[in-house]
Amino acid sequence: MTLYLVRHAHAGDRAAWTGDDRRRPLSARGRTQAESIALQVADVPLTRILSSPARRCLDTVEPLATLRELVVEEDDALAEGAPFDIIDRLLRRCGDQDALLCSHGDVIGAIVTTVRRRGVPVGREPRWPLGSTWRIEGWPDTDHAEFLPTPAAD
């Protein structure tokens, strides 16, 4: 099983958004990043796409779902602030499928930090900027993790 953990693309300034933050959409830059993310993983044999219910996450994976003709599965385990035991259960439920999951910095950070604590090299200063991806081999018995930078958003 390979999991691709994508942090949502650029969604503008959280402080400037006046509505419910879960409804905050991608910026123009973020939409370009979302298209680039779809191309970055175009050749990956994905069987599932899962996403936080936040609009910015759904918007991030929409181009990939369209390209692959897959339905995006919304899951609260990927929502901002989700407890790690809920996140862990979701990752275990992914079973032996190759899946892409789109979430938030705190969720991606918790997963990468857990992988690091389990002894898998993730670099001296692991990071998860907007629009970036982590490729995680296996869960919970992860044996490899790789950071894929945010694709250029020209």
Image: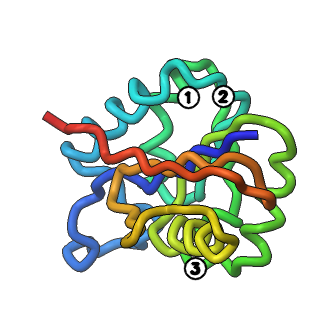
In the picture, measured across the screen, residue 129 lies left or right of residue 45, that is left
Point 38% across, 50% down: residue: 132
Q: Which amino acid does label 3 sit on?
A: Gly
- The quarter of the image holding the C terminus is top left
Q: Position of residue 75 (x, y in %)?
A: 70, 57
The disc placed on residue 46 is: 2
Residue marked by disc 1: 65
Vertically, is 117 above or below 87? below
Decide: few, some or many residues near mark 3? Use Cα within 10 Å; few <14, some 14-19, many ≥20: few
Vertically, is 147 above or below 44? below
Query: Which one is earlier in the sequence, the residue at label 3 or at label 1?
Result: 1
Query: Which one is earlier in the sequence, the residue at label 2 or at label 3?
Result: 2
Point 56% across, 46% down: residue: 135
Say which element carries label 2: loop
Which residue of the protein is positioned furthest toward the left in this rendering? 154
The disc placed on residue 12 is: none
Q: Do the residues labelled 2 and 1 touch (CB within 8 Å)?
A: no
Decide: few, some or many residues near mark 1? Use Cα within 10 Å; few <14, some 14-19, many ≥20: some
Point 33% across, 61% down: residue: 129
Residue marked by disc 3: 81
* Cα distance between the residues tagged 3 and 1: 25 Å
Query: Which one is earlier in the sequence, the residue at label 2 or at label 1?
Result: 2
Say which element carries label 3: loop
Q: Are marks 2 and 3 in contact (CB under 8 Å)?
A: no
Of residue 5 and residue 123, the one placed in the foreground of this image is: 123
In the picture, measured across the screen, residue 57 lies left or right of residue 90, that is left
Q: Which amino acid does label 2 sit on?
A: Leu
Of residue 25 and residue 149, the one placed in the foreground of this image is: 149
